Image (cartoon, helix red, strand yellow):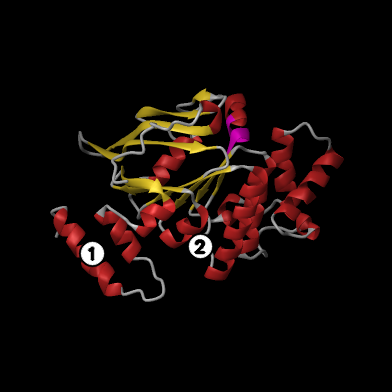
Amino acid sequence: MNAESDHPTDDRSADDLVVRATELRKAYRVRGRGSQTLAVDGVSFTVGRGESLAIVGESGSGKTTVANMVMGLIQPTSGTVELTGLGSTPGIRRAHERRVRSGYIQLVFQDPYLSLDPRQTVGAALEEVLTLHTELQPDARAARAKELLDAVGLPAEFLTAYPRPLSGGQRQRVAIARALAADPSVIVLDEAVSALDVTVQAQVLRLLARIRAERQVSFIFISHDLAVVNEISDRILVMHRGKVVESGVTQEVMSAPQHPYTKLLMASTPRPGWVPADAVRLRQEFAAALGES
């Protein structure tokens, strides 16, 4: 579907949805000028229970700004984000409200080393989340932390490890385990595998697919990589300059892209038989169509 937005014409019941974003818009003032720049312009979408939605685009497309608005890290200039059972949640909340929200939706960053405290063991990081979001006693928390590591394919001895000596893939598994510790309905993954090599990427993607199948957790997967998106998502939004230019079922969009920008992204993705010159040509044509040099 070639669309400016994936507007909520969704016929699923409210109980089947975990996120509904409506006409999200984020404008930033340009320093030294009286003007504003639009980072996100009229983006709408829904996420179903157990569904994986990918939001894709190159740097500057607005995809991470959308993720931050969904997470409640930044306030929309206009529009709303509704989380099932929590209502509309714009802006920064009180500590209790932030805790309730973080129990519903968790974020996995691109670089887990930056989001993990290097002075804190893996076990302590997991138990910290369990202390905030459960009423488990210390022995039960320790047992649950061990279960979480097992769920992401890491042995119990990692509980006493610190982040620094771990590999990138191991740290990302710890970050996923920490997100799962809150037992969220939704996990936002912001370029969560882009810093990993191809082999480790594949391992983490298989892990995420298994977790989604077992726990019926929903994913919002932020990425620039259509090859990764094809592996992990049911539906896709393609963003360019703050707007959704194409949306639909991932396999349908990938097999028959309609918008020139989607075609450009696909032509820029290395794969068997890939011809880099095609990507260069399409980028030049796209730039010309936009009136750019």
Residue 95 relative to residue 160: left or right: left
> 35 or 49, which lies in front?
49
The quarter of the rendered structure image containing the C terminus is bottom left
Of the numbered discs in the image, which one, if any, rests on residue 165? none
Question: Count of labels shown?
Answer: 2
In the image, which residues are magenta?
101-105
Between 249 and 260, the one lying in front of the other is 249
Residue drawn at (26%, 74%) of the image: 277
Of circles 2 and 1, the one toward us is: 1
Pointer 2 residue? 195
Q: Amino acid at mark 1?
A: Leu
The correct choice, above or below, for 214 with respect to 40 in the image is below
Visible residue check, residue 101: yes
**Residue under label 1:** 282
> Answer yes or no: do the residues labelled 2 and 1 have beta carbons within 8 Å?
no
Residue 79 in the image: x percent, y percent? 37, 28
Q: CA distance from mark 2 to mark 1?
A: 26 Å
Pinpoint residue 208: horizontal percent, then vertical percent: 60, 53
